[in-house]
Amino acid sequence: MKNSTIKRSLKQQIQNNLIAIISIFIAVSSLAYNTWRNEQTEYNRNVRTSSFQILMSLAELQLLVDHAFYNEDKEKGDPIKGWSYVLYVQGLAQTVSPEVKHNAEQLKKIWEKNWQLMHQQQSQNDAISQSIKVLRLEVLATLQSLQ
C-alpha cells in the first residue's frame, strides 16, 4: 500500500509540475544551442579574419615576385620581405583549415627552393606564382564553405 501511495504521489507531482519540467528542458536545450551557435560563429569569424589576412599577404607576395622578375626591382622584389609574407601566411594558415595549412607548407617549400633565382628564371617565378594561386583558391574555397 505504501509503494502504491508513493507511485501515485510521484505521478501527481509530475502532473502538477509538468509545465516547470518542460520549461527547464526548453531552457537547457536553448542554452546548449545558443552556446553551440556562439562557438560556431566565433570559429567562422576567426577563419574569416585569418583568410582575409592570408589573401592580402598572398597578393603582396605575388606583387613582390612580379617586381623581382619583370621589373628587376631589388627593393620591391626583396626576397627577405618575401620570407616574411611566406612565414606570416604559414602561421595564419594554422587557424583556417587542414587543406590551407598543407598548401601554405607547400608554398614555403616552393619559396625555399626557388626564391634565389625567382628574379632570373621564369620557371622559378612560375613555380612560386602557381603555389600562391593554389593557396589562394583553397582559402577562397574555405571561405565559401563557412556556415
Image: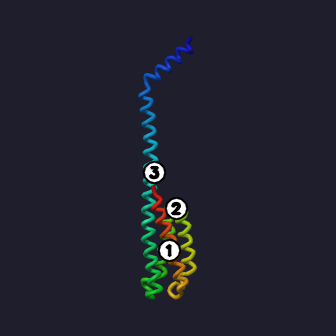
Q: Position of residue 15 (x, y in %)?
A: 45, 22
| Mark toward the start of the polypeptide (1 vs 2) | 2
**Residue that label 1 marks:** 132
Could you tell me the amino acid type at mark 3? Glu
Q: Are marks 1 and 3 in contact (CB under 8 Å)?
A: no
Q: Would you identify the image quadrant in which residue 34 lies?
A: top left
Q: Residues within 10 Å of mark 1 (few under 14, many from 20)?
A: many
Q: Position of residue 138 (x, y in %)?
A: 50, 67
Q: Secondary structure at mark 2?
A: loop
Left or right for 143, reference 127: left
Q: Residues within 10 Å of mark 2 (few under 14, many from 20)?
A: some
Q: Quadrant of the N terminus?
A: top right
C-alpha span from label 1 to label 2? 16 Å
Q: Quadrant of the C terminus?
A: bottom left
116 or 27: nearer the viewer:
27
| Mark toward the start of the polypeptide (2 vs 3) | 3
Q: Secondary structure at mark 1?
A: helix
**Residue that label 2 marks:** 97
**Label number found at residue 39:** 3
Q: Position of residue 140 (x, y in %)?
A: 46, 66
Could you tell me the amino acid type at mark 2? Ser
Left or right for 3, reference 89: right
- The residue under the point 55% across, 84% down is 123
C-alpha span from label 1 to label 3? 31 Å
Coloring applied to the structure: rainbow
| Mark toward the start of the polypeptide (1 vs 3) | 3
Q: Up-down: is 6 above or below 60?
A: above
Q: Up-down: is 88 above or below 39?
A: below
Total label count?
Answer: 3
Q: Residues within 10 Å of mark 3 (few under 14, many from 20)?
A: few
Q: Secondary structure at mark 3?
A: helix
- The residue under the point 46% across, 42% down is 32
